[in-house]
Amino acid sequence: MKHKILKKLIASSLVSLALVTLVPVGASAAWISGSDGAWYYSMGYSFATGWKYINGSWYYFDSMGKMQTGWIPYGDNWYYADLSGAMQTGLIQIEGKIHLFSSSGEMQKGSSMINGQLCNFDDNGVYIGSYPITPIKAFDYYGNSTMPYASNQLITSNSTMSKDIPSDGLYHPKQYTIKFKDPDADNEDDELLKTKTVDENSQMYLYIPTKSGYTFVEWNTKSNGNGTGYLDSDRIYVTQDMTLYAQWEENTNSNNNNNGNNTDTVKVTSIAVSGASGLKSIAVGGSLQMTCIVSPGDATTQSVKWSILSEGGSATISTTGKLTGTGAGKVIVKAAATDGSGVVGTTEITISAS
């Protein structure tokens, strides 16, 4: 189904491209280099997301508008884009392994006819067999264009790289998988929102999910919200596989009817966080009740969402703000407004070894 849809998108985009070539690109669309080193495509008042056909090539932009390169999971298929972001098609060699991509970019599995010969590709899309096929392009681990290996340098039937295929000689960092889930989803298919693969110790950008009738509050390492919390604006260093669970606040009617008079919702503007009696430290195993002052005092929603951000130490915090130290160091205690205002109050707590 997605194969047919992408074909239709390609066809429709070719028509659209023919219509817009007379319009100066700078007037409505342009490539923009972000401060994070990534590329974005401006559509005038917003950034492109998803698949976009630009100047003869297909590009994929994530939900934040960042252009993707390398392996791209989309739907039930895998795609590959070079360092310029252009989607690849045909026989492509990636890190010595030969893959076949359809004219719509999907990586192929199973059997395919190539030059009148039936060729087999395993479940990872890797060519297995002895019939010599020649890739049209080749890329190393980092996506750099290289010369394709000779046609007799193939992958063995157990999907391992032939010893005759030279290594690219580059350091390959360990990678981890981060899954973003909605713990309140109706079924398993809807639970997984997104998956990212990142290099070890690299900085990962979070994002804001959407859900009808709810306001996103934070990401949390526990499905019940009692783990370490991260705001969508946080950037975290990844050292292991992890799953982050979206925490939501159900939207309520913004107007309350009182004898025919409507009262406007008052949003939170600031939150001051502190430990009971002004305490700023506890010992490992000790507990401290955290408190917060929500301003203005007449804010419609006074409740907050408690979470912890590690600064070398570790701790847990309950839904009522009870902090328990579990590892020496420092932690940032955060109280986030649940009215959708995005306001967060923080304070630093030191956890001593004894």
Image (cartoon, rainbow, N blue to C red):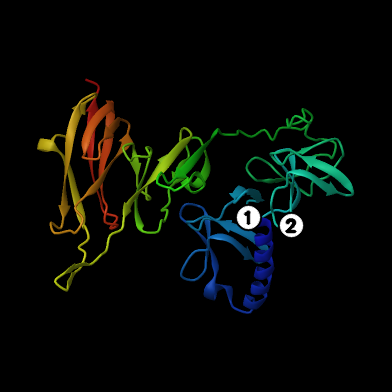
Cα separation, mark 1 vs mark 2, equals: 18 Å
Q: Residues within 10 Å of mark 1 (few under 14, many from 20)?
A: few
- Residue pointed to by mark 1: 84
Q: Is residue 152 above or below residue 10?
A: above
**Dot 1: element:** loop
Q: Residues within 10 Å of mark 2 (few under 14, many from 20)?
A: few
Q: Is residue 195 above or below residue 256?
A: above
Q: Which numbered disc, 1 or 2, marks the residue that appears first in the sequence? A: 1
Q: Which disc is residue 103 wearing?
A: 2
Residue found at x 24% / y 24% = 284
Three-letter residue code for mark 2: Ser
Three-letter residue code for mark 1: Ser
Q: Quadrant of residue 6?
A: bottom right
Between residues 278 and 222, which one lies in front from this camera angle?
Answer: 222
Residue found at x 32% / y 31% = 312
Residue found at x 49% / y 49% = 190
User: Residue 276 in the image: x percent, y percent?
Assistant: 12, 37
Horizontal side, residue 155 vs residue 218: left or right = right
Which residue ends up furthest to the right in the rendered image?
116
Q: Which disc is residue 102 wearing?
A: none
